């Protein structure tokens, strides 16, 4: 058993504290897992997850599992042995962010906000997302999600006021102009597929540069 495996098991058996998550995520990529089921399961938040546990006998390399999940649009739920609720959940957005950038969570000074206020005649940077910001395989998985919701051609646009902070905007028209009371739920659903630090906004296309097909 590796030192990281031993440390991770030790962390899982301690009570959560302010540094718990950071320590867990630091050691996790070097660990090995035991899959509880061969197929993805529905998690407590109703998204698909591979269920796994971490024991001294675990043999499945975490990196190999993360690589597979990143291509499938599936999250990862880590359980303690004999427990019914997961100890830690990796959303799909966390997983592909790690595969692309080496971090599960990137701490941003500016927290994501569902509201974007544009002043009249304000200069903004606008365009399609780069492959670094939204890799092709992630776009494909998002397209499939929208297709499952009967949305055939979702359109997106990346906006920035300062070239440092970027908002990923989804066209309200392309989503069928859902009522205002549904917006928060839609954003929460989309956010599962994207890194936690991404700022997501639902916007009307009116008066903005052209949106692009997802």
Image (cartoon, helix red, strand yellow):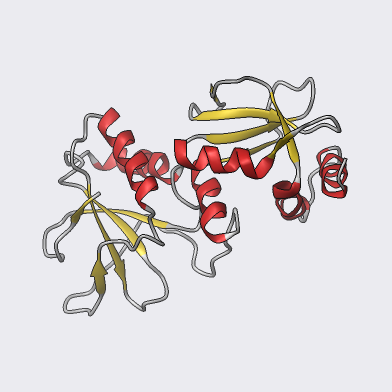
Total numbered labels placed on residues in the image: 0
Question: Which residue: 58% across, 29% down?
Answer: 50
Q: Is residue 51 left or right of residue 140?
A: right
> 99 or 169, which lies in front?
99
The answer to whether 212 is drawn above or below residue 95 in the figure is: below
The answer to whether 40 is drawn above or below residue 21 in the figure is: above
Q: Is residue 183 left or right of residue 1?
A: left
Give x and y (percent) for residue 139: 33, 47
Give x and y (percent) for residue 146: 28, 36
Residue 126 visible to an observer of this rendering: yes
| Quadrant assignment, res 153 | top left
Residue 73 visible to an observer of this rendering: no
> 141 or 160, which lies in front?
141
Question: Which residue: 21% across, 41% down?
Answer: 175
Q: Is residue 93 left or right of residue 65?
A: left
Question: Which residue: 18% across, 54% down?
Answer: 204
Question: Which residue: 59% across, 42% down?
Answer: 66
The quadrant of the rendering that contains the N terminus is: top right
The answer to whether 52 is drawn above or below residue 168 in the figure is: above
| Quadrant assignment, res 34 | top right
| Quadrant assignment, res 73 | top left
Give x and y (percent) for residue 55: 82, 31
Q: Residue furthest left?
A: 206
> 129 or 11, which lies in front?
129
């Amino acid at each position: 058993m590796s030192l990281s495996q031993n440390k991770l098991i030790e962390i899982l058996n301690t009570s959560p504290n302010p540094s718990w998550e950071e320590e867990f995520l630091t050691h996790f990529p070097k660990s090995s897992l035991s899959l509880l089921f061969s197929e993805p399961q529905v998690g407590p938040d109703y998204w698909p997850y591979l269920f796994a546990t971490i024991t001294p006998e675990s043999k499945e390399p975490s990196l190999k599992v993360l690589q597979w999940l990143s291509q499938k649009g599936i999250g990862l739920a880590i359980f303690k042995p004999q427990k019914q609720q997961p100890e830690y959940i990796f959303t799909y957005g966390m997983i592909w962010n790690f595969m692309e950038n080496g971090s599960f969570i990137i701490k941003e000074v500016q927290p994501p906000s569902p509201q974007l206020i544009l002043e009249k005649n304000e200069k903004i940077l606008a365009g399609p997302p780069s492959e670094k910001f939204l890799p092709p395989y992630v776009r494909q998985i998002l397209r499939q999600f929208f297709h499952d919701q009967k949305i055939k051609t979702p359109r997106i646009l990346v906006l920035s006021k300062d070239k440092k902070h970027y908002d990923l905007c989804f066209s309200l028209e392309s989503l069928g102009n859902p009522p205002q009371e549904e917006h928060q739920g839609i954003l929460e659903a989309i956010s599962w597929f994207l890194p936690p630090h991404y700022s997501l906004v639902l916007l009307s296309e009116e008066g903005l540069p052209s949106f692009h097909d997802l």
